[in-house]
Image: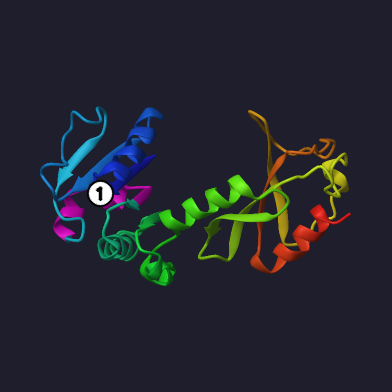
Amino acid sequence: MRVAIAGAGAVGRSIARELVSKNHEVLLIDKDPAKVDPDRIRGARWLLGDACEVANLEAAQLADCDVVVGATGDDKVNLVLSLLAKTEYAVRRVVARINHPANEWLFTESWGVDTAVSTPRVLAALVEEAVEVGDVVRLFGIREGQANLLEMTLPDDARCVGRAVRDLELPKDASLVAIVRGRRVITPSPEEPLEAGDELLFIALPDSEDALRQSIMTS
């Protein structure tokens, strides 16, 4: 997979390092000469330039990329890059970082964004996950919030504890995608029994969240 990442700060470099370790082809773009240092991530390609300028995107051969990531600390840059990547270069998947929560409403398909990642929202979700047992925690929005990745940690008295996955009475717009049990990640099979302390990961539409909570938790 070929990935272009705008922003060679700590976030962009971390993404690039992870992708390079998995043998993906990665290009980092940044206009700050101090950040363009090939020795920092061996195996990645680097381009010094403004990611909002078409000439630089042409040099980056953005049309050949499978994924473009706007990972700069400037929401305006991430939005402009997303729009150019989608409309001018038909990049299949565009991921954009949201730095300021007030700008979340802009990061939609209208601006070319397929997936938006809000650091403050993710951190808030992780805080909730650490303290909430027995409630639904929204970890991540998918496709502009049309669906959400949800986490639910089962308390001892949850309705579904001791039941097999096939016996769950889930709402029609919710699906169990993984069970985290200790250090294991379990792909749900119909026969898998649920245990207290299990972390259940669901994909669900927003309107189904209350029904999901009731089906899992209510005795």
Q: Residue furthest left?
A: 33
Left or right: 102 in relation to 190: left
Q: Position of residue 23 (x, y in %)?
A: 38, 29
**Is residue 92 visible from the viewing direction of this image?**
no
Residue situated in front as seen by the camera: 175 or 156: 156
**Is residue 182 visible from the viewing direction of this image?**
yes
Colour scheme employed for the rendering of this structure: rainbow
**Residue 130 placement: quadrant:** top right
Dot 1 amino acid type:
Gly
Residue situated in front as seen by the camera: 127 or 24: 127
Residue situated in front as seen by the camera: 172 or 64: 172
- Residue under the point 34% across and 51% down: 68
Q: Is 39 rendered above or below residue 103?
A: above
Q: Is residue 188 magenta?
A: no
**Residue 116 placement: quadrant:** bottom left
Q: Position of residue 212 (x, y in %)?
A: 76, 59
Callout 1: 10 Å neighbours few (<14), some, many (20+)? many
Q: Is residue 55 magenta?
A: yes
- The quadrant of the image that shows the N terminus is top left
Q: Position of residue 132 (x, y in %)?
A: 65, 50
- Residue under the point 60% across and 58% down: 148
**Number of numbered discs:** 1
Task: Tell me which secondary structure the magenta stretch mostly adopts.
Answer: helix
Q: Which residues are magenta?
A: 54-68
Q: SS for tag 1?
A: loop
- Residue under the point 70% across and 48% down: 133
Left or right: 188 in relation to 145: right
Residue situated in front as seen by the camera: 43 or 157: 157
Q: Residue furthest front?
A: 131
Q: Is 40 rendered above or below residue 200?
A: above
Residue that badge 1 annotates:
7
